[in-house]
Image (cartoon, grey):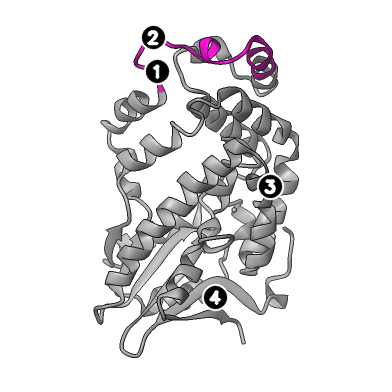
Amino acid sequence: MVTRFIPRLIAVGLLFCSQALLAQSAVWQVSNDQHQLFIGGTVHLLPANEFPLPAEFDKAYQQAEKLVFEVDISKMMDPSIGPMMLNYAMYQDGRTLSSVLSEESYQRLQQAAAALGVDTKALAPFKPDFVLVQMLQLKLQQLGMAGEGVDMYFFNKGAQDNKNKAFLETIEQQFALLFSISDGHEDDWIAQNLDQLDETEQFMRQTLAAWRSGDREALTELVSDMHDTEVGQRFYQRLLTERNQDWVEQIDAMLQTPEVEFVLVGALHLAGPDNVLDLLAERGYQVRQLSAN
């Protein structure tokens, strides 16, 4: 899960741009004749200099009676989460990192990991997906781009204000998904992610600029190369398309009640083929992007 794929979910979903010049933001109002809710595109890891957030986020928050997140972030602090994550991140059948990769891929991974201060020998029982996540996080930390994300910001703010909360999926569902993408495609997964590792900073800055202005076309372009390979298509289908379809069912149910929700999901779920906003529009809902004007 490195730059061209994983960060699009854990960091976008993630710059120097003048907020005052941006007419729109990554917040949309979705409504029918009776009810409404708001959907905000988030970046799960956000550099500190990206705060404060665009004003439209606060406008939606103030009107919302309930906050809806992808997952219950508070459970990540539970002591039981570590062992649970390891159960999904590690092979349980005797396989190892080196046994599922070709010699060439494994050597390349070792070299890239060593440059980040990671010892792949210690990660021998882990799946490539997990190893690449760790490498990406270290890379983002080195770049100063691994601060509190939009989700955590509103989770904490909602707790202070006693806002009701709901969640689109469980932590178990996310772990099962994130740490199984490479199954059967390990070498391709390593190659495509490592090919882009050096471009992490440029990609993140482009992503942050597109996110901040709510530029769905730019976000779509940033993930367009996912469709060029089998493993990229697999990633897009499982991490975006399938989840979007499931979430839209839940959001549709929310729109049948008078309660106003503010749904916060990774920005990439709101762009590209089969995105949440288009799927809702296809169901007849009115979708309007909030602007500063």
Residue 214 picture location, percent across and down: 61, 69
**The stretch drawn in magenta includes residue 282:** no
Which is more foreground, mark 1 or mark 4?
Answer: 1
Q: Earlier in the sequence, mark 4 or mark 3?
A: 4
Label drawn at residue 55: 4
Which stretch did the figure color magenta? 90-109
Mark before the other along the chain sequence, 1 or 3: 1
Estimate the spatial distance between the alpha carbons at disc 1 and disc 3, rounded to whole Å: 29 Å
Distance Cα–Cα, label 1 vs label 4 = 45 Å
Residue to which mark 1 is pinned: 91
Q: Disc 1 versus disc 2: distance between alpha carbons?
A: 7 Å
Classify 10 Å Cα crowding around label 3: few (below 14), some (14-19), many (20 and above). few
The one of 18 and 225 positioned closer to us in this rendering: 225
Residues at discs 1 and 2 in contact (Cβ within 8 Å): yes
Rendering coords of residue 76 (x, y %): 34, 40
Quarter holding residue 158: bottom left
Work out which quarter of the rendered image holds the C terminus and state it.
bottom right
- How far apart in space, not on screen, are marks 4 and 3 (Cα)? 32 Å
The residue at which mark 3 appears reads as 225
**Residue 135 has which mark?**
none
Q: Is residue 218 above or below residue 226?
A: below
Quarter of the image for residue 177 reads top left
Q: Nearer the viewer, mark 4 or mark 3?
A: 3
Q: Work out whether residue 189 or residue 289 is closer to the camera in this orientation and state it.
A: 189
Q: Residues at badges 1 and 3 in contact (C-beta under 8 Å)? A: no
Q: Earlier in the sequence, mark 2 or mark 4?
A: 4
Q: Count all numbered tags in the image, as a single digit.
A: 4
Q: Is residue 104 above or below residue 254?
A: above
Disc ID at residue 94: 2
